[in-house]
Image: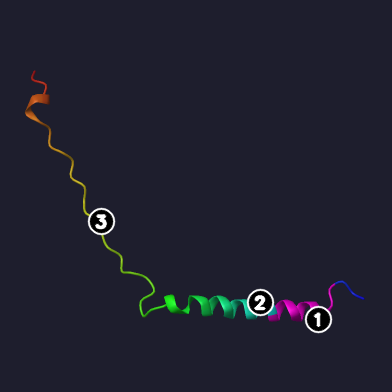
Amino acid sequence: MRLFSTDLFRNFGIGFVVGALLIAGANAENWSGELASPAQAAETLQAPAPSAEFVIAR
């Protein structure tokens, strides 16, 4: 009896295919025509203007 026989590789291959089909089937309802939402640019941040009371006079 060999440690890595061809039956072992065949069973792993079948298990991989069946598992991939099960995962794809479980996620099929979440698939839509659009896989990702379009990118949206963030608004530019505006620094607050300095107040007159904090201005140091020379």
Q: Position of residue 13 (x, y in %)?
A: 70, 79
Label 2 sits on residue: 16
Which residue does the image show at 68% across and 78% down from the upper left?
15
Q: Is residue 26 magenta?
A: no
Q: Residue furthest right?
A: 1
Q: Which residues are magenta?
A: 4-14
Element class at badge 2? helix
Residue 1 position in % (x across, y down): 92, 76
Query: In whole angstroms, how far apart are the C-alphas of marks 2 and 3?
Result: 42 Å
Query: Mark 3 belongs to which amino acid?
Result: Ala
Q: For the residue marked with disc 1, what is the amino acid? A: Asp
- Residue 11 percent location from the top left of the image: 75, 79
Which residue lies under the disc numbered 1? 7
Left or right: where 27 falls relative to 11: left
Mark drawn on residue 53: none
Left or right of 50? Residue 5 is right
Between the C-alphas of marks 1 and 2, the distance is 14 Å
Q: Amino acid at mark 2?
A: Phe
Task: Report the predominant secondary structure element of the magenta stretch.
Answer: helix
Sequence-wise, the earlier of marks 2 and 3 is 2
**Furthest residue to the top?**
58
Q: CA distance from mark 1 to mark 3?
A: 55 Å
Query: Measured from the top left, where is residue 2 in percent x and y?
Result: 90, 74
Magenta stretch: includes residue 6: yes
Q: How is the image coloured?
A: rainbow
